[in-house]
Image (tube, grey):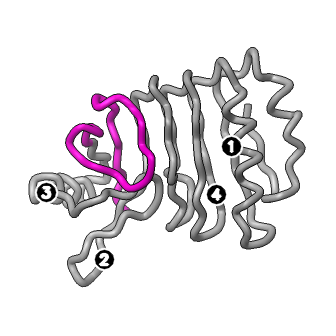
Amino acid sequence: MSIHMKKGEWHLPVLTNFSNSLEELTLCISPDHEQDADLQDLSKSIQQLSKLKKLKLSFLWKRCSFEIESKTIEKIDMTGSEEGCFLDKCICPSLKVFKCNYKRSNDAEQEQSNGLRPRFPFSDNILEKLESCKRNRKGVHVTVGECSFVGMIVVPETCKVMFTSQ
């Protein structure tokens, strides 16, 4: 299912009515106002989707935080989200792949564009992979066990965080 909606103007029963059958969901959310408090209701609705395996989130405004808690989600894709949209909480014990964007600023400081924020700077090895990724336009992955992330991130250590370069 693919849904495009304005932030704060969603009708959550559209999601929860499919809680026992929906396996793939794409949410494209346009801005309405700058408050993120109403995203908690959306997060709770996603948590009720007991069969959901794949979730693609596109937040179309800069700077937001979101929470995901799901026992069944195996893949999350935030590459369509604007810069500054991050998960502050991701409790997904079945998660295998998390896709997000990475960019490096001009002053050689690393910046995470969206998705998950590394707690510490990447190692030189990972930075080399990311630079290579930028040149050949492919993604680079690290496992959650290789990198610590900001927030409450409870996923398998073997989960691959796939970075695409901007």
**Of callouts 3 and 2, the N-terminal one:** 2
Specify the amino acid type for callout 3.
Ser
| Residue at left offset 42%, top offset 64% | 113
Q: CA distance from mark 4 to mark 1?
A: 13 Å
Specify the amino acid type for callout 2.
Ser
Kindly identify which residue carries mark 2.
105
Specify the amino acid type for callout 1.
Ser
How many labels sit on residues?
4
Instruction: Find out whether the residues at labels 3 and 4 contact each other: C-beta distance under 8 Å.
Output: no
| Residue at left offset 10%, top offset 53% | 125
Q: Is residue 23 magenta?
A: no
Q: CA distance from mark 3 to mark 2?
A: 16 Å
Instruction: Find out whether the residues at labels 4 and 1 contact each other: C-beta distance under 8 Å.
Output: no
Q: CA distance from mark 3 to mark 4?
A: 29 Å
Q: Is residue 156 magenta?
A: yes
Measured from the top left, where is residue 118 in percent x and y? 32, 57
Kindly identify which residue carries mark 4.
59
Instruction: Find out whether the residues at labels 2 and 1 contact each other: C-beta distance under 8 Å.
Output: no
Measured from the top left, where is residue 54 in percent x and y? 57, 29
Q: Within the image, what quadrant is residue 106 found in?
A: bottom left
At mark 1, the secondary structure is helix
The tag on residue 43 is: 1
**Of callouts 3 and 1, the N-terminal one:** 1
Kindly identify which residue carries mark 3.
123
**Of callouts 4 and 1, the N-terminal one:** 1
Q: Quadrant of the C terminus?
A: bottom left
- Which of labels 2 and 1 is toward the front? 1
Q: Quadrant of the N terminus?
A: top right
